[in-house]
């Protein structure tokens, strides 16, 4: 892939829709989403709360069904074929792995077993998966905590476990659902930097949902701004044209362009946030 | 040394907003109260029996109950290990075996009901419909089916335990954080992993509560079952003692059941601490 902009398409969304019935009336959560995400791209979705951005992610993760439309995730067949003989009878890498919120790691498993969960599901033996998992645990800075249980870890450390769990599973695309939303500001900045560093090593395609404009600018190659419900694409803002890779969180945040980008995204988002609030107030009555 | 250095800026009682003397607030004092209250009551009982204030036909003096207790440890022709151990041991054996026979299928069926909709649809009405029957009411049926021997005791305890454990397990699985089930699905966990790596440990705290409730019911049921359908055990001892008016022995039986209840609670609490190290305490 090198340093040039990746161009092959990794995820195609063709008119992906979600609606459900409330008291006999059809409520649209997601209007037809039409979008292409490139291989190796860090793609952020921001939108007002209730706009369906998490729904879109959960549809991609196979945790919710779509009402209409088509999703294509391109499998890297060359990579698969190369790894297949070494893999033996084990299932191939999954199309996607999700990084959930803070509470998603299993409190009854130690760090090692939490990180190895996806590998166990794919059929790796205990010895194999512990071997695979070890560098990922070290990479997120948790070496020495292999046998610790989650209640002994801080919120930031739990999220590191969650990140390692997804990366160790080696998926085609990574889905991230506001993974740092519950963390304090300083921990969040640290983890954003770590996520960028780990991501640089693999350059996996990432779909990242957040409500934080700041986070989107720091992380994304492109930011998709969604409208209030039913969620539509309002704008796609190219961050990669302004900030290259590899990227440093503090460099981005202290630059002049950061403020301009923030203004641009907020300018698109403001009306939608107001609209979403009006919808919520309407429902409350 | 300057004595002024040792004076704290404020006294501890001020800090806690209490001006009572220190000994009154200390944990040791409260613990001492807890130890002395039963001893005091026992002493009161002993004295009232001795001075004739209490009717010793119904409330024999504690020391005579204790003498009976010691006598019951002596081996006799009928009880080579002593009468006490025979009855106590038989009841413990019945509870242990019956408890396991009820708890294991209770957990297994409960997990299946919690995770799989159609299993729940089939079994839930059966549970709801039969749960209100007092478990001891089916003892005659079990005696008819399995005879007066041990099998009917195991069965009645297993039935009493299975309801508590099954209902708790279903509730435990239903209350698992949804995000953990999402992780299982997103990471393609198969059915075995969903059961053993997510549902079982996730429901374990509630299952333990079910086991504790089940143990309580098991104690109740075994004593009543032994009243009428056994030739040994705590219930048998209590029942026959009152029939032949050996009230001291009856009290020994009551003591046994208290020890059994207390001991099983301690064991289950240790089991909980060992099985659920992540549970906040």
Image (tube, rainbow, N blue to C red):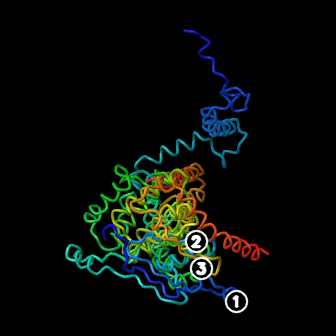
Sequence-earlier tag: 3 or 2 = 3
Q: Are marks 3 and 2 on the same chain?
A: yes
Q: Position of residue B100 (x, y in %)?
A: 43, 66
Chain for mark 2? B
Q: Secondary structure under badge 2? A: helix
In the picture of the structure, the residue carrying the numbered disc 1 is A25
Residue drawn where x is 57% and y is 70% of the image: A46
- Check disc 2: other Cα within 10 Å, few if <14, some if 14-19, many if 20+: some
Answer above or below: position of B265 versus B7: below
Q: Position of residue B142 (x, y in %)?
A: 50, 77
- Check disc 1: other Cα within 10 Å, few if <14, some if 14-19, many if 20+: few
Q: Are marks 2 and 1 in contact (CB under 8 Å)?
A: no
Q: Are marks 3 and 1 on the same chain?
A: no
Image quadrant where residue B41 sits: top right
Residue drawn where x is 71% and y is 28% of the image: B14
Q: Secondary structure under badge 1? A: strand
Q: Nearer the viewer, residue B208 or B15?
A: B15
Q: Are marks 3 and 1 in contact (CB under 8 Å)?
A: no
Residue drawn where x is 47% and y is 64% of the image: A242
Chain for mark 3? B
Q: Is residue B17 visible?
A: yes
Q: Position of residue A209 (x, y in %)?
A: 52, 69
């Amino acid at each position: 892939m090198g340093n040039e902009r990746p161009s092959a398409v990794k995820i195609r969304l063709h008119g992906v829709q979600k609606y459900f019935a409330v008291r006999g009336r059809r409520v649209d959560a997601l209007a037809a989403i039409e979008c292409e995400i490139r291989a190796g791209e860090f793609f952020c979705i921001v939108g007002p709360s209730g706009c369906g951005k998490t729904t879109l992610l959960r549809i991609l993760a196979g945790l919710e069904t779509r009402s209409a439309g088509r999703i294509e995730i391109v499998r890297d067949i060359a990579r698969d074929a190369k790894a297949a003989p070494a893999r033996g009878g084990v299932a191939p890498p999954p199309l996607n792995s999700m990084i959930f919120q803070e509470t998603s790691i299993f409190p009854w498993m130690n760090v090692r077993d939490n990180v190895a969960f996806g590998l166990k599901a794919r059929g790796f033996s205990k010895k194999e998966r512990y071997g695979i998992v070890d560098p990922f645990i070290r990479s997120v800075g948790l070496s020495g905590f292999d046998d610790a249980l989650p209640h002994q870890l801080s919120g930031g450390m739990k999220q590191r476990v969650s990140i390692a769990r997804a990366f160790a599973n080696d998926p085609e695309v990574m889905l991230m659902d506001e993974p740092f939303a519950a963390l304090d500001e300083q921990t969040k900045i640290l983890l954003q930097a770590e996520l960028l560093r780990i991501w640089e090593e693999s350059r996996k395609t990432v779909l990242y949902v957040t409500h934080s404009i700041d986070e989107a600018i720091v992380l994304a190659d492109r930011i998709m701004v969604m409208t209030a419900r039913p969620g539509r694409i309002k704008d796609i803002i190219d961050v990669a044209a302004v900030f290259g890779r590899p990227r440093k969180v503090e460099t981005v945040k202290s630059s002049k362009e950061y403020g301009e980008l923030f203004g641009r995204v907020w300018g698109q988002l403001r009306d939608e946030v107001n609209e979403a609030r009006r919808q919520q107030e309407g429902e409350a009555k | 040394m300057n004595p002024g250095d040792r004076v704290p800026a404020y006294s501890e009682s001020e800090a806690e907003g209490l001006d009572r003397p220190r000994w009154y607030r200390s944990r040791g004092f409260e613990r001492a109260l807890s130890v002395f209250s039963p001893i005091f009551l026992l002493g009161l009982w002993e004295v009232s029996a001795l001075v004739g204030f209490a009717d010793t036909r119904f409330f024999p003096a504690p020391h005579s109950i204790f003498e009976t207790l010691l006598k019951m440890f002596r081996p006799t022709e009928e009880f080579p290990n002593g009468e006490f151990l025979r009855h106590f041991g038989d009841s413990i054996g019945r509870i242990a075996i019956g408890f396991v026979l009820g708890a294991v299928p209770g957990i297994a069926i409960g997990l299946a009901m919690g995770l799989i909709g159609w299993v729940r649809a089939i079994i839930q009405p059966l549970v709801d419909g039969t749960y209100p029957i007092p478990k001891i009411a089916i003892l005659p049926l079990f005696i008819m089916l399995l005879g007066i021997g041990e099998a009917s005791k195991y069965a009645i305890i297993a039935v009493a335990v299975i309801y508590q454990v099954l209902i708790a397990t279903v509730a435990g699985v239903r209350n698992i954080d949804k995000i953990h089930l999402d992780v299982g699905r997103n990471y393609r966990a198969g059915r075995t992993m969903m059961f053993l790596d997510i549902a079982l440990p996730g429901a374990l705290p509630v299952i333990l509560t079910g086991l504790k409730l089940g143990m309580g019911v098991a104690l109740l049921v075994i004593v009543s079952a032994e009243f009428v359908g056994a030739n040994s055990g705590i219930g048998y001892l209590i029942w026959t003692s009152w029939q032949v008016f050996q009230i001291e022995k009856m009290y020994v039986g009551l003591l046994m059941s208290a020890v059994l209840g207390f001991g099983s609670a301690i064991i289950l609490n240790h089991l909980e601490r060992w099985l659920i190290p992540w549970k906040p305490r």
